[in-house]
Amino acid sequence: MDDLLQQAKAGADLDVHARVFAAMERELFTRAIALAQGNQAKAARWLKISRQTMREKLQLFGLKEPADKDGADERGA
């Protein structure tokens, strides 16, 4: 974070707020899903978000494998 602020101070065209927020959000979802032992519904309840939002964020952050091409999840359901 300090590096980003120093770069911005030096005139770099950075969206420091967005970058720091994205990093913190990724860390939050990483920790929540780990604490929930992979249980997306439980982690979503703790964060007061929908399970769908949890799934989208996990995929966005590379914390969940995408569903295979026919739409089945990793359990084959």
Image (cartoon, rainbow, N blue to C red):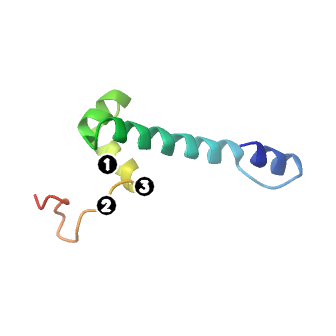
Q: Position of residue 47 (x, y in %)?
A: 37, 30
Whichever of labels 2 and 3 marks the residue nearer the N terminus, that label is 3
Q: Which of marks 1 and 2 is in front?
A: 2
Residue 64, percent from left and from top: 33, 55
Q: Mark 3 points at which residue?
A: 60
Q: Distance between the Cα atoms at labels 1 and 2?
A: 10 Å
Q: Which residue lies furthest to the left in this view?
A: 77
Please say if the residues under marks 2 and 3 sit with CB atoms less than 8 Å apart: no
Measuring from the top left, give residue 2's x and y in whole percent.
Answer: 76, 42
Residue 30 locus on image (x, y percent): 43, 44
Q: State yes or no: discs 1 and 2 in contact (Cβ < 8 Å).
A: no
Q: Mark 1 points at which residue?
A: 55
How far apart, in angstroms, are the residues tagged by discs 2 and 3?
Answer: 10 Å
Tell me the CA gap for discs 3 and 1. Answer: 9 Å
Residue located 34% across and 28% down the image = 46
Q: Name the residue under label 2.
A: 65
How many residues crowd mark 1 within 10 Å: few (<14), some (14–19), many (20+)? Answer: some
Left or right, 75 with reference to 37: left
Determine the residue positioned at 82% across, 48% down.
Answer: 8
User: Residue flagged by tag 1: what amino acid is it?
Assistant: Arg
Secondary structure beneath disc 3? Answer: helix
N-terminal label among 3 and 1: 1
Q: Nearer the viewer, mark 2 or mark 3?
A: 2
